[in-house]
Image: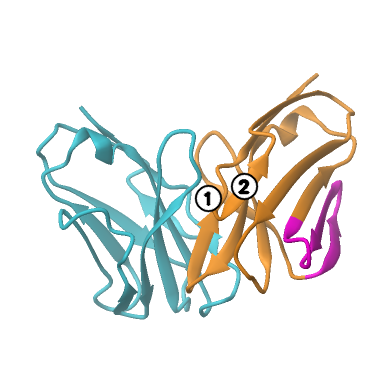
Amino acid sequence: GAGVSQSPRYKVAKRGQDVALRCDPISGHVSLFWYQQALGQGPEFLTYFQNEAQLDKSGLPSDRFFAERPEGSVSTLKIQRTQQEDSAVYLCASSLVGGQPQHFGDGTRLSIL
Amino acid sequence: KNEVEQSPQNLTAQEGEFITINCSYSVGISALHWLQQHPGGGIVSLFMLSSGKKKHGRLIATINIQEKHSSLHITASHPRDSAVYICAVPYGGNLIFGKGTKLSVKP
């Protein structure tokens, strides 16, 4: 497909479980962003990659959150020992380079029981 | 303090009405984004503008850089326009988002 692809679309996990969310950006896009969107709120920045380098992870809420993009394309956001407050939609976006319009995926809706 | 403020938070309109959604921001920016988010969660970029006005179909976006204010207008609104409209500004390499305006257009 031509767009940003995220999987799974929905994820339900029990508190304490680890989860992994995948983002497949548009081919050739250098920049990749992860955002967290709580119910009724706008998205909030989590982390940013330029190719495989994680240039900014200032938005990650705790050390339970970890993101990687080892080959500069697909990215994975991992949340360890999930808590109820982690329930949110996790959005991935990519852009050709920094400063260019970001293209968003459909998001992964994570529910922690 | 929110760097990006949107109003109104919720908006209900009748089909055919002219819609205006406002966005004010406090940071210095080079451009502003208007995004549309449908209930499924996916976000679509509508406009990126740095000055003046842009038009795409029934959508019009304006920005006043000096006043740090932007508006999104929808002419002849339709139920399929029902969505959350979010403005976002680039800051520090990523985007800062408003909380969104939830628009419901009734037939």
Q: Give the secondary structure at mark 1.
A: loop
Q: Nearer the viewer, residue A7 or B41?
A: B41
- Disc 2 and disc 1 on one polypeptide chain: yes
Q: Which chain is cyan?
A: A
Whether residue A1 appears in this view of the structure is: no
Q: Which residue is mark 2?
A: B5
Whether residue B59 appears in this view of the structure is: yes
Task: Tell me where residue B44 appears, x and y as whole percent.
Answer: 61, 52
Note whether B67 is above or below A37 in the view shown.
below
Q: Is residue B84 magenta?
A: no
Chain ID, mark 2: B
The residue sitting at the front extreme is B1
Display colour for chain B? orange
Task: Tell me where residue B39 appears, x and y as whole percent.
Answer: 54, 33
Q: Amino acid at mark 2?
A: Glu
Q: Is residue A85 left or right of residue A63?
A: right
Note whether B52 is above or below B60 in the view shown.
below
| CA neighbours of label 1 inside 10 A, class few (<14), some (14 to 19), many (20+) | few
Q: Is residue B15 left or right of residue A36?
A: right
Q: Which residue is mark 1?
A: B2
Magenta region, residue range: B51-69
CB contact under 8 Å: marks 2 and 1 = yes
